[in-house]
Amino acid sequence: MTQILDFIGNIKLTQVIDVLIVWWLIYRLFMLIRGTKAITLLRGVAIVVIVKLVSWFFDLSTISWLTDQIINWGVIALVVIFQPEIRRGLEHLGRSAFFKNHKNDQDERQFISDLDEAIQYMSKRHIGALISIEMETGLEEYMETGIKIDAEMSSQLLIQSFIPNTPLHDGAVIIKDMRLAVAAAYFPLSDNPTIPKELGTRHRAAVGISEITDALTIVVSEETGGVTITRNAELMQDLSREDYMKYLERQLLPKPKNTDENIVTRFLNAVKPGKED
């Protein structure tokens, strides 16, 4: 017990901060590549490392030599293989909160209003739609399957993307940073047996993307006009306008900050004396 206390006592604050920063960077890296082909390659790297450790523990010289060669040359190979992901990661860093202006609450509310207008228009006319909003996890791999738009978000443009018998209507629209990034993108279909049988390809694609990313995906049914939202493998089916608006505002609007002014105001209101009888 004494040794443990001595060890804890010798830990410096800078060492704790150092470890926390490293873990935060690792977490952000995995969130960035989650849902991309890079995660599959990382599994292969992990297998090579495990084989190396096992060969070293059991003194398997030939296997150890082979894994050494793979690791030595693999560094160069990884740079080549992961070149698109490295470029996207640097671009993502450049667009991070440290280097860009924060969008205000009015921008967010206008974005939700445009979404609502498009959803209502398509729902009333039974125009099928699949709209995915990028959250924390990158959707670049799925953007590559679509047609690049990179335009400012508007209800009219969103509606036009799903008009039947047009080149862009078949597939998903991906929205990134409140801009319409691509149209006619394709998502993996979920094979979850609990999905109702009456739901079609759009709903299965929406559930599929929600199982591997944290994207917020909106589906408008072509058959019924019903509105469905999926996120984190959760299927919220046949939502009313009031329900989906509350959900969008809760997920997309910035959380209110407990500023010192708000705290002082609440305190003064709490201690304000009431009127005497």
Image: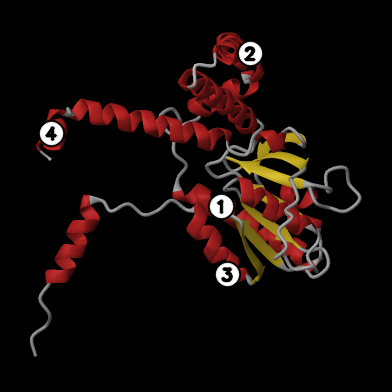
Considering depth in this image, is 169 or 37 the residue closer to the camera? 37
- The picture quadrant where one finds residue 70 is top right
Identify residue for label 3: 243
Question: Which image quadrant: the N terminus?
Answer: top left
Q: Is residue 259 above or below residue 119?
A: above
Q: Count neighbours of disc 1 (C-alpha within 10 A) and say few if under 14, some if 14 to 19, many if 20 or more.
A: some
Image quadrant in which you'd find residue 101: top left
- Secondary element under disc 4, as helix, strand or loop, is helix
Q: Specify the amino acid type for callout 4.
A: Gln
Residue at 81% over, 65% down: 126
Q: Is residue 105 left or right of residue 14?
A: right
Crowd rating for badge 3 (residues with CA inside 10 Å; few <14, some 14–19, many 20+): few
Instruction: Give the mark toward the camera: 1 or 4.
Output: 4
Residue 37, above or below 243: above
Q: CA distance from mark 2 to mark 4?
A: 45 Å
Label 1 sits on what residue type?
Answer: Gln
- Disc on res. 110: 1
Q: Looking at the image, is mark 3 or mark 2 nearer the viewer?
A: 2
Give the total number of marks visible in the rendering. 4
The CA distance from mark 3 to mark 2 is 49 Å
Q: Secondary structure at mark 2?
A: helix
Residues at marks 1 and 4, CA–CA distance in whole angstroms: 59 Å
Give the residue drawn at x 59%, y 20%: 87
Q: State yes or no: discs 1 and 4 in contact (Cβ < 8 Å).
A: no
Q: CA distance from mark 2 to mark 1?
A: 45 Å
